Amino acid sequence: MSKQAVEKQRQISFEFSFEKKVDRYVQEKEDILKAIDTRPARRSAENELELCIEIAAAIKRAIKETDMSRDQVVDEINAWFGRTEEGVLSDPPTCRKPLTIHMLNNYLSKPVEYPIPSYYICAIQSITGSFEPVNVMVSSDGARVATGAELRQLALGKIEQNIDEMQKLRKQIRGNLR
């Protein structure tokens, strides 16, 4: 076989395997996009009353994991919002009355009668560092809250996967050029 025929054969085999990889990549991307667009039809709670109970249970777990007492959580929530008795008197429209331990206990022990306001969930999430209450709310859509560390790990994994693909293609191209 002549040198030109060998080179042409290498080009043909390179183009074929490259096309297969591109086709596989396009198919995988389409599959991922379909999976992203598909919204799971699952609900953890049958109604809003059950959802209130699930959220309260998640908040209890989040508090328990911190080893903080409920009194300490109340103090932290009030500090998070800047709520004080003095603030209520001096700045009534912007400073609400501080949360009491009695009211937190009602939110957590009688969630059907006293559903916890969502702004308290934001404070509790920040104070406890737990996404459990929020995960209860987003799980009905098949979602889960990712921490900053998890997002960075995911980004690193994607970068490493792309680097691996580039290195494989580089080796293949170099091999076919020789």
Image: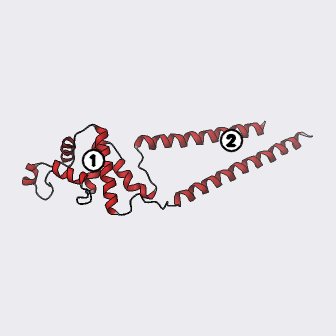
Rendered location of residue 63, percent (x, y): 28, 43
Return the x and y of residue 136 as percentages of the image width and height.
Answer: 37, 53
Label 2: element kind: helix
Placement of 170 over or under 38, stated as above or below: above
Kind of residue sitting beneath label 2: Leu
Q: Is 13 displayed left or right of 110 in the figure?
A: right
Mark before the other along the chain sequence, 2 or 1: 1
- Quadrant housing residue 162: top right
Specify few, some or many for label 2: CA neighbours under 10 Å numbering under 14, 14-19, or 20 or more.
Answer: some
Task: Identify the disc placed on residue 162.
Answer: none
Graded by Cα atoms within 10 Å as few (under 14), some (14 to 19) or many (20 or more), the crowding at tag 1 reads many
Instruction: Point out the frontmost of discs 2 and 1.
Output: 1
Left/right placement of residue 19 relative to residue 126 reads right
Left or right? Give the position of 64 relative to 1: left
What residue does disc 1 label? 124
Residue name at image x 84 percent, y 42 percent: 7
The three-letter amino acid code for the residue at tag 1 is Ile
Q: Tell how many labels.
A: 2
Picture quadrant where residue 126 is located: top left
Judging by the rendered image, the residue that carries numbered circle 2 is: 169
* Residue 43 location (% of width, % of height): 43, 60
Name the residue at 19% across, 45% down.
Answer: 74
Q: Quadrant of residue 95?
A: bottom left
Residue 63 visible: yes
